[in-house]
Image (cartoon, rainbow, N blue to C red):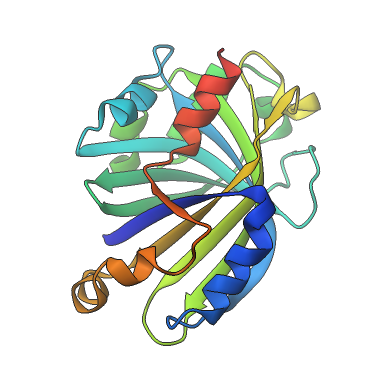
Amino acid sequence: MRYEKKYTFGIRDLKNVREDLWKSKLGFRDSFPSRINHTIYFDSFNYDDAVDNLSGLSKRYKVRLRWYSRVNHYKIDENTEFQLEIKLRRNALGDKIVNKVKLPNEILLSSELNIINYIKKQLPHKFKPYLNHCTNLSLGVFYQREYLVSKAFNIRATLDSNINYWNPNNICLGEKYFNKNYKVEYGVVEIKYPKKVYESIGTEDLSLISNSITPSRHSKYVVGSTLINK
């Protein structure tokens, strides 16, 4: 597992934040081409995973289906490269386990419970306990993600902007999976670093990277769930 620190910023400061990351003594540089990150979260009807996050449980997790694109489009089919991710959290430490999944068109055109059950059948045994409570598609989100790495330390960073939330409940993913979206006027920086780096540089340097960012416990899942259910 690795330490993960999150920061938020006003979307008008996106350019400044990007430049501050480049100019910082950590020496961030682009490590991978920017792309659109699409995610659908799985949860119970009672939003158990969201509640665990809000309550601040030291050990918690989220289940999500993820895919990527270079342009912002809203069409998926059986050729889309999906992956099922379990995002793990242990206090300030984070990790994830990932498995590629296939979704035929007839499954994408079926109910959300059928989609979840079909995915369950494809997964290795270690994934299945995390999905036992999942009964519905609880939140959709897409955003632009930039990938950076420090040339001085083994530190990675992601810079998320153009964040949009949408409600995937009771719609057909194989036809028109995107409906009314909620765009937010902020971005998120996440910095991920091994324990040894954390011990050698501490957290102060990370907080001083930019005057435009604010330390945060931000969760896209919690924010988006609140927006689509208000």
Residue drawn at the location 38% of the way across and 36% of the way down: 62
Q: Position of residue 84 (x, y in %)?
A: 49, 43
80 left or right, relative to 192: right
Q: Is residue 78 above or below residue 169?
A: below
Q: Quadrant of residue 88?
A: top left
Task: Check the image and report above or below for 188 versus 153.
Answer: above
111 displayed left or right of 133? right
Task: Say left or right for 199 vs 113.
Answer: left
x, y (%) of residue 174? 75, 28
32 up-or-down from 113: above or below: below
Which of 3 and 217 lies nearest the eye of the viewer?
Answer: 217
Looking at the figure, which quarter contains the N terminus? bottom left
Q: Is residue 134 visible?
A: yes
Q: Is residue 177 left or right of residue 13?
A: right
Q: Nearer the viewer, residue 193 or 117?
A: 193
Quarter of the image with the C terminus is: top right
Please tell me which residue is depicted at 48% across the width and 33% down the height of the picture: 221
Residue 157 higher or lower than 13, as above or below? below
